[in-house]
Image (cartoon, rainbow, N blue to C red):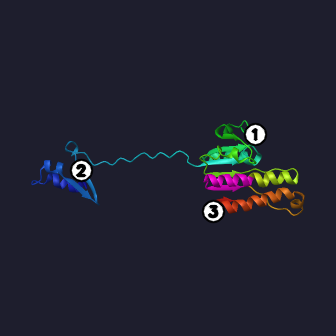
């Protein structure tokens, strides 16, 4: 382009006023000259690229627990916006990362407590699990997680990750409610999130 303009300027039959009025077209893009800047080289300034703020919001169910607290910390380290819902609400952990989590208090056996926590969430990781009698183990590992899966699906959440457990023969028999609840949750997850569910 510099060569073309230079030839036009030095040509005796071409006047500066004609150059000012002319638009040069190169590769389908038009460039206009400004009479005050004819001797300056053509400059293209790059736009500054600023990374957008995190748009992924993660909700960790059971973020106060051993596994859940590690998930929260790792998610924050990867630049995600993190919220957590648990029965106790705000974390009792005094680690600095815990202040960067939005803490919600709620009970997964009541789907009403999930509504506010799911607002704007793109993914959920459930670390909820527990032991006790067979019926309470089924409620914690099954019913509570199934409620969360259904609420997340209704809210339009893209992904749901469920921390499950493998069967261990005799242990499976001794903790029947625990494993039955886990299996029921896995089935619900694959039904509600056939493409965005991870176990």
Q: Secondary structure at mark 3?
A: loop
Q: Between marks 2 and 1, how big is the CA–CA gap?
A: 66 Å
Q: Quadrant of the N terminus?
A: bottom left
Q: Who is closer to the viewer here, 14 or 75?
A: 75
Q: Secondary structure at mark 2?
A: strand
Residue 181 image point, x, y percent: 80, 57
How packed mark 3 is, by other alpha carbons closer than 10 Å (few <14, some 14-19, many 20 or more), is few
The residue at which mark 1 appears reads as: 88
Q: Residue furthest left?
A: 13
Q: Which of marks 3 and 1 precedes in the sequence?
A: 1
Residue 195 image point, x, y percent: 63, 62
Q: Who is closer to the viewer here, 130 or 22?
A: 130
Residue 9 image point, x, y percent: 16, 51
Bounds of the magenta segment: 145-162
Q: Quadrant of the C terminus?
A: bottom right
* Residue 199 shows in the view: no
Q: Which of marks 1 and 2 precedes in the sequence?
A: 2
The residue at which mark 3 appears reads as: 195
The residue at which mark 2 appears reads as: 32
In reply to whether residue 153 is colored magenta, the answer given is yes
């Amino acid at each position: 382009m510099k060569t073309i303009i230079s030839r036009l300027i030095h040509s005796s039959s071409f006047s500066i006023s004609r150059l000012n009025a002319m638009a040069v077209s190169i590769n389908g893009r038009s460039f206009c000259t400004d009479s005050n800047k004819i001797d300056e080289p053509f400059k293209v300034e790059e736009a500054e690229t600023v990374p957008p703020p995190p748009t992924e919001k993660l909700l960790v169910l059971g973020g106060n627990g051993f596994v859940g607290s590690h998930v929260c910390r790792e998610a924050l380290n990867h630049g995600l916006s993190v919220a957590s819902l648990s029965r106790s609400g705000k974390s009792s952990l005094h680690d600095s990362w815990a202040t960067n989590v939005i803490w919600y208090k709620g009970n997964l056996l009541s789907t009403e407590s999930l509504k506010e926590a799911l607002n704007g969430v793109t993914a959920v990781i459930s670390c909820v699990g527990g032991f006790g009698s067979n019926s309470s183990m089924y409620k914690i590992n099954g019913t509570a997680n199934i409620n969360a899966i259904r609420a997340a699906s209704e809210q339009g959440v893209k992904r749901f990750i469920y921390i499950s457990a493998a069967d261990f023969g005799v242990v499976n028999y001794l903790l029947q409610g625990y494993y039955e609840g886990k299996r029921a949750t896995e089935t619900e997850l694959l039904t509600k999130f056939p493409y965005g569910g991870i176990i």
